[in-house]
């Protein structure tokens, strides 16, 4: 391999790693704020599965370590919003050494675009780290 080929390969690999880091940051963190207002703390978005049956739309939202009591669900025009706070797993344990943090923590919010005027929230269940929301389709008359 020529030294020029090695140089090109190294740059391509470095750029690929930067692209992956940027993708992961966009996946887990979103920063917002209106003009003139201070930016809020970083907000992460949990992954969501959206499954449609003939009777309903079911949302499966991954919320590891989040208590059911802390979850706020809001059905707004054109979207469903789920928010809460996931505490750092060990708090401030004395002597703890962090080796890897991959599961996000802190305040989160996830908005899922849906035709909410055609749906009614009928079920809410948090089990095994997943929140299941069942939105039943309304009868159109």
Image: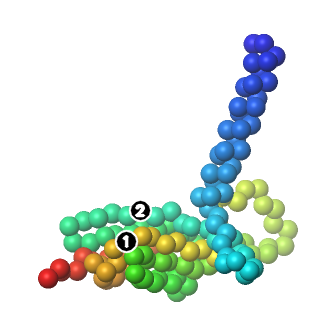
Who's the residue at 62% across and 62% down the image?
28
Q: Indicate the position of residue 11 as horizontal and vertical percent values.
A: 76, 31
SS type, badge 1: loop
Q: Is residue 83 visible?
A: yes
Residue 37, relative to residue 18: is it above or below?
below
Numbered mark located on residue 88 in the image: none
Residue 51, relative to residue 108: is it above or below?
above
The image quarter in which residue 127 lies = bottom left
Numbered mark located on residue 114 in the image: 1
Q: Indicate the position of residue 48 as horizontal and vertical percent values.
A: 46, 64
Q: Indicate the position of residue 115 as horizontal and vertical percent values.
A: 33, 74
Who's the residue at 85% across and 68% down the image?
95
* Mark 2 nearby-residue class (10 Å; few <14, some 14–19, many ≥20): few
Q: Find the residue positioned furthest to the top.
A: 2
Q: Nearer the viewer, residue 94 or 35?
A: 35
Distance from the alpha carbon under mark 1 to that under mark 2: 13 Å
Q: Is residue 87 visible?
A: no
Q: Find the residue positioned furthest to the front.
A: 35
Identify residue for label 2: 49
Q: Is residue 123 left or right of residue 101?
A: left
Which label's residue is closer to the chain start, 1 or 2? 2
Residue 75, relative to residue 52: is it above or below?
below
* Number of marks in picture: 2
Q: Quadrant of the C terminus?
A: bottom left
Q: Indicate the position of residue 62 as horizontal and vertical percent values.
A: 50, 66
Who's the residue at 64% across and 76% down the image?
107
SS type, badge 2: strand
Q: Nearer the viewer, mark 1 or mark 2?
A: 1
């Amino acid at each position: 391999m020529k030294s020029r080929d090695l140089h090109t390969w190294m740059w391509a690999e470095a750029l690929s790693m930067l692209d992956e880091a940027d993708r992961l940051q966009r996946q887990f963190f979103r920063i917002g704020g209106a003009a003139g207002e201070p930016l809020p703390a970083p907000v992460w978005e949990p992954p969501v599965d959206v499954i449609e049956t003939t009777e309903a739309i079911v949302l499966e939202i991954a919320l590891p370590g989040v208590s059911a009591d802390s979850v706020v669900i809001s059905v707004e025009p054109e979207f469903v919003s789920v928010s809460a706070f996931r505490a750092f797993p060990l708090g401030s344990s004395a002597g703890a050494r962090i080796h890897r943090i991959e599961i996000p923590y802190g305040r989160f919010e996830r908005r899922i675009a849906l035709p909410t005027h055609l749906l009614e929230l009928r079920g809410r269940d948090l089990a095994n780290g997943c929140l299941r929301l069942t939105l039943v389709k309304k009868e159109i008359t």
